[in-house]
Image: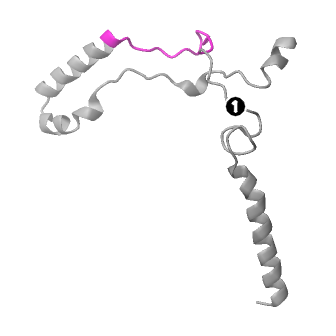
Amino acid sequence: MSKQVSLMLLTCVILGTTAACPAQAQPGGRGRGGFGRGPVEPPGPPAPVPPEVAMPRPTAEEVTRMNAALKQFIKTSPEKPLLQKYQSILTVQVPRDNRCIRPAAGIRAFRHETL
């Protein structure tokens, strides 16, 4: 490698690392967690879901009844050993809350309220 190419490569590496270092700043700065917008606010309450797209969610009692029916099926099935081996996969669980779909108040929230 020529001396000029080596020097250019070294310069690019130095400039690249100095440009990346401020991105490692504290949250609220230009780094992780804040992206220069200040402290991150917790998500708000879930937004209302239109009935046309709402997913049916089983109650805790319905989940209990489904699991009891599955256990009864496993007991009477000719594939009982196989189903017992993977019984943890075959149980129905209550759907957990998805926090990712909640709206969060942010820096742009006031813009929507002023329109």
Q: Is 16 on the left or on the right of 71, as rendered? A: right
Side of 111 where 52 appears, left or right: left
Q: Amino acid at mark 1?
A: Pro
Quarter of the rendering containing residue 28: top right
In the image, the segment drawn in magenta is 46-61
Q: Nearer the viewer, residue 89 or 16?
A: 16
- Pick the quarter of the image with the N terminus: bottom right
Instruction: For the C terminus, give its image quadrant.
Output: top right
The answer to whether 71 is drawn above or below residue 80 in the figure is above
From the viewer's perspective, is 64 left or right of 13?
left
Q: Nearer the viewer, residue 71 or 14?
A: 14
Q: Determine the image quadrant of residue 14.
A: bottom right
The residue at 74%/24% (across/down) is 106
> Residue 98 lies in magenta, yes or no?
no
Question: Was residue 49 drawn as part of the magenta stretch in this picture?
Answer: yes
Q: Which residue is mark 1?
A: 39
**Residue 66 percent across, percent down from the top left:** 28, 17
Spot occupied by residue 30 in the image (x, y as percentages of width and height):
75, 44
Q: Residue furthest right?
A: 115
Rendered location of residue 75, percent (x, y): 12, 26
- Mark 1: secondary structure: loop
Per the picture, the main secondary structure of the magenta-coloured stretch is loop
Question: Relative to 106, does residue 80 appear above or below in the rendering?
Answer: below
| Quadrant of the image occupied by residue 58 | top left
